């Protein structure tokens, strides 16, 4: 006998609610685990901390790329919000330096975010979304600072991407904020001055920089 539609919906409703709660719990826990151990952290550790079976994690996110994609959307929203706030600063140089500082603050304490920003999973979808949203804003921050005469004219937006990637790894147990020393050095190098020598070679194109980041972090493109 075919069950009545009303009864079927009522029986299914708690399952959907449980699934939604488990998904939210997995995402919250995975964010903590990835922040500490990076994107290669095991599902078993996520399940243990969340207090659920590892099978539940696999049912909600059969592919690791799906889990990272879900987390990346929130993380990229945070970085984009920082960049957009920087754009609203009337002082173009102050806006650019504030963006670099705040983006680094988040990446240094969140290993998962750092790896997501610097590399990609095999399909690369989440990284292309990140580039589409964040890339134009960074280009605008650079263009504004150069138009104001505060930033050297031969710097490209991709140069900042390389520098962010490198500085996000500059942290030690004794000096967790060691990156601030090198940010100060890099900012001095980015400033426009009449005595600067031209930069050698050209900045890498987007795809070349993407490949460089993946190679440095030992991930496939």
Image (cartoon, grey):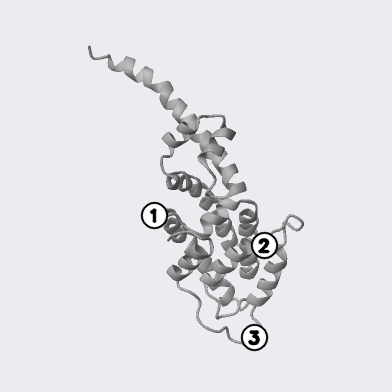
Q: Residues within 10 Å of mark 2 (few under 14, many from 20)?
A: some
Task: Evaluate whether residue 90 shows in this view.
Answer: no
172 vs 44, left or right, is right
Q: Residue at x 43, y 68 (%)?
A: 207
Note whether 178 is above or below 106 in the view shown.
below
Q: Residues within 10 Å of mark 3 (few under 14, many from 20)?
A: few
Using the numbered discs, state the Cα–Cα distance from disc 3 to disc 1 in whole angstroms.
41 Å
**Mark in the foreground, 2 or 3:** 2
In whole angstroms, how far apart are the C-alphas of marks 2 and 1? 28 Å
Proximity of marks 2 and 3: CB atoms separated by less than 8 Å:
no
Q: Residues within 10 Å of mark 1 (few under 14, many from 20)?
A: few
Q: Which residue is mark 2?
A: 170
- Total numbered circles: 3
**Residue 193 vs residue 218: left or right?**
right
Q: Is residue 127 in view?
A: yes
Q: What secondary structure is marked by label 1?
A: loop
> Label 1, on which residue?
123
Of the image marks 2 and 1, the number of the one nearer the N terminus:
1
Residue at image position (59%, 34%) is 49
Image quadrant for the N terminus? top left
Question: To which quarter of the image does residue 29 belong?
Answer: top right
Marks 2 and 3 sit apart, C-alpha to C-alpha, by: 26 Å
Residue 204 spot, x, y in % from top left: 48, 74
Upstream in sequence: badge 2 or badge 3: 2
Q: Residue furthest right?
A: 174
Q: Is residue 57 left or right of residue 196?
A: left
Q: Which residue is mark 3?
A: 196
Name the residue located 62 percent from the left edge and 47 percent from the top edge: 36
Q: Position of residue 102 (x, y in %)?
A: 64, 58
Percent x, y of residue 115: 54, 56
């Amino acid at each position: 006998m075919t069950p009545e539609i009303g009864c079927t919906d009522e029986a299914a409703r708690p399952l959907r609610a449980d699934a939604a709660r488990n998904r939210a719990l997995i995402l919250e826990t995975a964010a903590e685990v990835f922040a500490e151990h990076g994107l290669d952290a095991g599902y078993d550790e996520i399940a243990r901390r969340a207090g659920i079976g590892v099978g539940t994690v696999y049912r909600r996110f059969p592919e690791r790329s799906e889990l990272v994609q879900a987390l990346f959307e929130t993380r990229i929203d945070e970085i984009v919000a920082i960049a957009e706030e920087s754009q609203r600063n009337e002082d173009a140089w102050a806006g650019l330096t504030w963006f670099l500082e705040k983006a680094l603050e988040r990446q240094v304490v969140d290993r998962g975010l750092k790896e997501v920003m610097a590399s990609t999973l095999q399909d690369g979808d989440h990284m292309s979304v990140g580039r589409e949203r964040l890339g134009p804003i960074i280009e605008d921050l650079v263009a504004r600072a150069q138009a104001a005469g505060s930033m050297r004219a031969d710097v490209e937006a991709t140069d900042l991407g390389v520098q962010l990637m490198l500085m996000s790894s500059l942290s030690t147990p004794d000096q967790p904020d060691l990156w601030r020393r090198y940010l100060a050095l890099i900012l001095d190098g980015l400033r426009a001055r009449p005595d600067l020598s031209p930069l050698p070679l050209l900045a890498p194109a987007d795809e070349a920089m993407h490949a460089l980041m993946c190679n440095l972090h030992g991930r496939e493109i």
